[in-house]
Image (cartoon, rainbow, N blue to C red):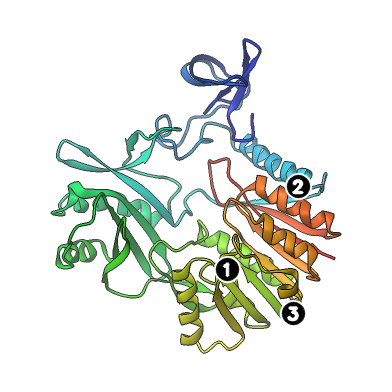
């Protein structure tokens, strides 16, 4: 199996990558893409199932592109994820490090985006097909929280009755701690009256409904604030704000970060988002929180003021274009860094050049984690601990949290 979880065969001297296959399968394969280096195929028929193949629990698995690993036995899946973690640490220079993974239950994802698909007059919620832009209608999704799973059938029905239903491009749903948040994306800018959404909100007990067009996001209806708990503080979140994929993962990551920084009195939180870690850290330390997104940074400042927190300073700063310099990092003993999938090459290089004594890195991309962790190792940081959190069930993705010190 390759790094993305595709089975790998060989054909005409080239590697042949086959999604949703596994070791030991005997398959009829249809070649769908070819380059000078490799081929990609799709399964035309399963001749003989390999010993690791199991029946996928989701009825949409064969067509849907959302999950890629429902067809392999649980232990094989866990070994695959463990291999991802050890490979990432190895590429960073920490070979044979004894790191483990916490595997979360499948039904813990608290947000999802669905495309809109019409079959005649019937509106359906859809995911993209495997590595395509085809829209695959789905009636259920086993990786979502029970509340979101139960919402899907009535949501599709009620959305189909909206006067502008045909202008819907997608719908994003988030289960916050205070209720359900809905973001409707329109194909083009148009006037939508708030009263046209009232029935939707009341029927499905939606807390907030916002609209997204090319000109941005606008909240049209808010029955109550949408908030999540961060260290005991109810933090209001803007529409489409970044959250960890599951509440359970957020709790685990927060506990890990708090334990790693116990006793530290000055901390900088880089790529802080809505302040998921900043608020609990500020209970025992002075914290500077930096976030590039203006809306999230503004919300963080508002929450700090609302809760009367004097130990937390929040600022907007694009850390890709303008990373904190080694000199600017000098007042801090520890840094938390939780960048997007692209990682944080420039900011990590500045951390390496600084006098920071401890770095806690949270990453959803093992490849960029390896690159940035290697930079820290070359700057004499040692690896205190590393842990994987499998909050992306049935996928090749893995969250990694690692603590470095010098």
Picture residue at 56% right of the left edge, 63% below the top: 250
Tell me whether circle 2 and circle 3 mark residues in contact (CB < 8 Å).
no
Q: What kind of element bears circle 3? A: loop
Where does the C terminus fall, quadrant-wise? bottom right
Q: Nearer the viewer, mark 2 or mark 3?
A: 3
* Label located before the other in sequence (2 or 3): 2
Where does the N terminus fall, quadrant-wise? top right
Q: Is the residue marked by circle 2 packed among few (<14), some (14-19), or many (20+) residues within 10 Å?
A: many
* Depicted 402 relative to depicted 23: above or below: below
Q: Which residue is mark 3?
A: 331
In the rendering, at what x and y percent does residue 77 appear? 61, 37
Q: 41 or 149: nearer the eye?
A: 41
Q: Which mark is residue 272?
A: 1
**Residue 114 vs residue 10: left or right?**
left
Q: Which residue is mark 2?
A: 89
* Depicted 149 relative to depicted 267: above or below: above
Answer yes or no: is residue 208 visible. Answer: no
**Residue 148 vs residue 23: left or right?**
left
Tell me whether circle 1 and circle 3 mark residues in contact (CB < 8 Å).
no
In the rendering, at what x and y percent does residue 319 appear? 60, 64
């Amino acid at each position: 199996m390759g790094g993305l979880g595709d089975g790998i065969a060989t054909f005409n001297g080239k590697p042949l990558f086959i999604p949703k296959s596994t070791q030991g399968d005997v398959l009829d394969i249809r070649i769908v893409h070819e380059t000078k280096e490799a081929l990609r195929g799709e399964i035309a028929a399963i001749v003989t199932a390999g010993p690791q193949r199991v029946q996928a629990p989701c009825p949409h698995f064969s067509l849907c592109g959302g999950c890629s690993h429902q067809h392999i036995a649980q232990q094989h899946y866990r070994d695959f994820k463990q291999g991802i973690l050890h490979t990432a640490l190895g590429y960073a220079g920490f070979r044979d490090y004894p790191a483990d993974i916490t595997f979360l239950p499948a039904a813990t994802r608290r947000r999802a985006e669905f495309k809109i698909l019409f079959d005649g007059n019937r509106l359906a919620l859809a995911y993209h097909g495997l590595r395509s832009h085809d829209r695959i209608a789905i009636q259920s999704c086993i990786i979502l929280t029970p509340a979101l799973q139960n919402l899907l059938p009535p949501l599709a029905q009620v959305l189909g009755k909206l006067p502008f239903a045909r202008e819907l491009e997608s719908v994003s749903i988030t289960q916050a701690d205070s209720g359900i948040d809905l973001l409707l994306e329109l194909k083009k800018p148009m006037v939508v009256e708030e009263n046209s959404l009232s029935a939707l909100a009341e029927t499905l007990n939606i807390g907030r409904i916002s609209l997204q067009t090319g000109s941005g996001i606008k909240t049209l209806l808010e029955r109550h604030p949408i908030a999540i708990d961060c260290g005991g503080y109810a933090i209001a979140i803007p529409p489409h704000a970044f959250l960890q994929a599951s509440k359970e993962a957020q709790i685990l990551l927060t506990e890990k970060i708090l334990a790693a920084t116990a006793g530290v009195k000055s901390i900088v939180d880089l790529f802080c988002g809505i302040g998921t870690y900043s608020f609990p850290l500020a209970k025992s330390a002075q914290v500077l929180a930096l976030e590039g997104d203006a809306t999230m940074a503004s919300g963080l400042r508002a929450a700090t003021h609302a809760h009367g927190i004097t130990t937390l300073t929040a600022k907007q700063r694009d850390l890709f274009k303008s990373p904190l310099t080694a000199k600017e990092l000098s007042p801090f003993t520890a840094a938390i860094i939780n960048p997007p999938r692209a990682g944080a090459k420039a900011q990590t290089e500045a951390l390496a050049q600084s006098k920071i004594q401890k770095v806690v890195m949270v990453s959803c991309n093992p490849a960029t984690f390896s690159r940035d962790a290697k930079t820290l190792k070359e700057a004499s940081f040692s690896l205190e601990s590393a842990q994987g959190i499998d909050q992306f069930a049935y996928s090749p993705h893995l969250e990694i949290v690692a603590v470095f010190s010098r």
